[in-house]
Image (spheres, helix red, strand yellow):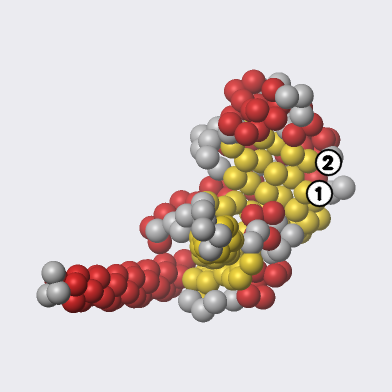
Amino acid sequence: MDILVPIIIVGVVALGIAGVIAHYVYERRRREAFQVLAKRLGMRYSPHKNYALADRYAFLDKLRQGDKRYAYNILEGDYGGHPVQVFDYHYQTYSRNSKGHRQTHHHYLSVFVLLHDAFFPELHIYPENFFTRMGQSLGFSSLSISFESNEFSRSFVVRCDDKRFAYDICHTRMMELLLQDRKLSLEIEGNCVAIDFERRLKPHEIEPRLQQLIAIRNQFPEYLYRR
């Protein structure tokens, strides 16, 4: 037994070191893949933590959660005729375990932001889930705006103080587009259109999501830009 304890300790330490090395290698390969992608798309790339960017977009709901918020692995430039930014995003929250000890939880997102020449009211479109359905069953119908498409209304929650704007955005073609990806989360506010994902996307997934963001923007009625 006296010999077994040191062996276990050495094994645990070795596993910890192996985990650190594996993480380092993964992150290095991820950065290299982003560099290749940036060069191919003609965009700029920065792997460094950027707290200012997190503050700049803090008006977006998903980006003002928790603390120690920062962006990194940042791609920016022109794509599809629009200025865009793509980045990994980190924030952390805390909880207490049964013994009262504080635990730190790290959260990671992939965020895509498109900037346009308009200033729109805040609008959120995100997937329907158990909690939103429960709220509606309890009479909190104001949580979501209803649309003629029952399928769309069952699949997504749409929240906006300006219902006319929500109806302008969620026209038939837009609803058909969004129904192709029922896990999509979309936020519009000011001159930003943003989609986000509750995980860090792999580099080969970035361009298809950029194309998706451009497709969403291209469904915005042009008369909204002439008001």
Mark 2 and mark 1 in contact? Answer it, CB < 8 Å.
yes
Density class for disc 2 (Cα within 10 Å; few <14, some 14-19, many ≥20) is: few
Q: Using the image, determine if residue 7 lies above or below residue 226.
A: below
Q: Using the image, determine if residue 51 lies above or below residue 173.
A: below
Count of labels in the image: 2
Q: Residue at x 65, y 28 (%)?
A: 134
Q: Nearer the viewer, residue 102 or 48?
A: 102
Give the residue number, with chain letter if any, for mark 2: 161
Q: Residue at x 32, y 74 (%)?
A: 20
Q: Which mark is residue 121?
A: 1
Q: Nearer the viewer, residue 95 or 157?
A: 95
State the separation of the CA atoms marked 2 and 1: 8 Å
| Element at label 2 | loop
Q: Nearer the viewer, residue 12 or 208?
A: 12
- From the top left corner, tell me how far across and down residue 53 is, in percent: 65, 71
Residue 111 position by quadrant = bottom right
Q: Residue at x 81, y 49 (%)?
A: 121
Residue type at the position of mark 2: Asp
First in residue order: circle 2 vs circle 1: 1
- From the top left corner, tell me how far across and down residue 106 is, in percent: 51, 62
Q: Which mark is residue 55?
A: none
Residue type at the position of mark 1: Pro
Q: Disc 2 or disc 1, which is closer to the eye?
A: 2
| Element at label 1 | strand
Q: Nearer the viewer, residue 64 or 207?
A: 64
- The reply to whether residue 210 is visible in this rendering is no
The answer to whether residue 198 is left or right of residue 84 is left
Q: Residue at x 60, y 45 (%)?
A: 185
Quarter holding the N terminus is bottom left
